[in-house]
Image (tube, rainbow, N blue to C red):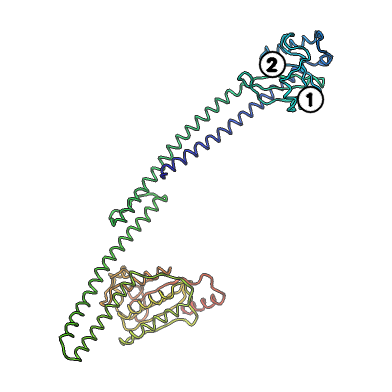
Amino acid sequence: MTLRNRFTAFFVAFAVLISALGGVLTWNAARQALEEQLDRELLSAGALARESLFRADEVLLLLEEGQVPPSVWFDYQNALRQMVASGVVDRADIFRWRPGDFEVRALVTPDPPDSIAILQRLSWIEPYVVSGMVQEAFETGVATTPTFSLDRRDYRHGIVRLNSAETFLILRIPEDHLEPLRALAWTIVALSLAAAALGALIGWRLATGIVSRLEVLSRGALRIQRGMMDRPFDLDGEDEVGRLARAMERMRTGIQRRDEQLRLMLSRVAHEIRNPLAGLELFAAAAQDTDDREERHRILGRVRREVVGLNSIINEFLGFARPGRTELELHDVRDPVGDAVSLAEAEVRAKGGELHFEFPAQPLLANADPRQVKRLVLNLLRNAAHAGETIWVEGAMVNGEVRIAVRDDGPGVPQEIRERIFEPFVGDKAQGAGLGLAIVKEMAEANHGRVELVGRDGGNERIGGGAEFHVYFSGPEDLPTEGVRRQAEQEEGVAK
């Protein structure tokens, strides 16, 4: 099922459920209220008849089967007929019942005298004896029966005990209130259908608005998959789809920028490798043509240096293309930084330079990958070695973060490339492929850290000038008491 159909089905089901549930509750409440009102009217009519018409009902207990009714009997019969003729009730009977007896005997009816004999058994009332309705009227004085159907019409009986304990007046009244309830039921059905149609329309419109925007994003994703990334995602809105469109736009620009970097890297790889290969070809030809052993040895030495340089260029490209997996752990950064300093110190001293290592005696704990810390510091050191002769490496805990600073006494970073210094292939040095600082930035961010450029052009007033790079890593979240004290002492010493 499509998303549009799901939305529509949900709104239809919700609208039908709410309207049907509300309609059923309304119908039940209306029926209950009407039935209670009908019971009150039925019992009120019976109580009024008992107090005004049938006060002297003890004489009815003296009736015997087959005897001629006394004159009061005819008065009672006329009273019942008048009640029926007035429309108050549909039928009225007086019967006799004794507790413990399952038979009900007729005493007075509105029918002609020859239709129902005195003390004739009334079988249609006996189910109410079995169900306890007559017993309830005997004990409390009144009772009502459930609704029953007769000749396709609904009725209800009310039983009222007369003054004597064994005579009862039973009244029948039609439940005409069920007719408007049936009309109400059909109205509820019609409203439910209308709510379903309205829910379908609203769901379809909402789903169409959402799905159409998602289809735009889907087509854009297919264009990206096919390599066509020139068309931007221009969907507006502050809802989830709008945020998704902006995220996909950032993804598109990121992939586009990455593709441009890869194309530039491939062209740069070809250029960087072609020159050493051309030199290797010339050196190999010269070594092949010469018979002088010392000359051949000198040429092979140059070949070896070219191979080493070519290998370093390839390693630099591979380091940028495959940064490796980052595994964060809490460790003392003095160890990986010390390893990087040891590797770079030989290269610096071979050029006649100096490398100063200034780290506190206390551990500097950071959440980072030790191998990548070593690698990015080594890249910064080599970058500094190309720029100047003296290099300073410093470490400190600043505002809960571990800061590693690498600076040199070189000319610094030109103002025109300061904003792009961490982009691939940006730099002013002649050696390398220009990926060192890009690799440093990538690894710092992979470790949830950051790298910043300060320096002479950035307001650095320290003696030595040159460029200065700061790398920040997250410190431990919960330092023990001793660690807090040492950090406070260390920050105080740095401030001095």
**Element under label 1?**
helix
Considering only order in the chain, which callout, 1 or 2, is on the residue closer to the N terminus?
A: 2
Q: Nearer the viewer, residue 326 or 277?
A: 277
Q: Nearer the viewer, residue 352 or 13?
A: 13
**Mark 1, other Cα within 10 Å: few <14 / some 14–19 / many ≥20:** many
| Disc 2 residue crowd, few under 14, some 14–19, many 20+, Cα 10 Å | many
Q: Residue at the spot x=34%, y=56% of the render?
A: 249
Which quadrant of the view contains residue 340? bottom left
* Side of 2 relative to 49 (left or right): left
- Identify which amino acid the numbered label 1 is placed on: Phe
Asked where in the image residue 349 lies, by quadrant, the reply is bottom left
Quarter-of-image position of residue 278: bottom left
Task: Give the CA distance from mark 2 to mark 1.
Answer: 21 Å
Residue 445 lies, in percent from the top left, at: 40, 68
Residue furthest out toward the right: 62
Does 77 sit left or right of 463 as displayed?
right
Please tell me which residue lies in front, 67 or 172.
Answer: 67
Q: Is residue 174 above or below residue 230?
A: above
Question: In the rendered view of the protein, which quadrant contains the N terminus?
Answer: top left
Q: How many marks?
A: 2
The image shows residue 75 at horizontal and vertical percentages of 77, 10
The picture places residue 441, in percent across and down from the top left corner, at: 36, 70
Residue 138 circle label: 1
Q: Return the mark for residue 91.
A: 2
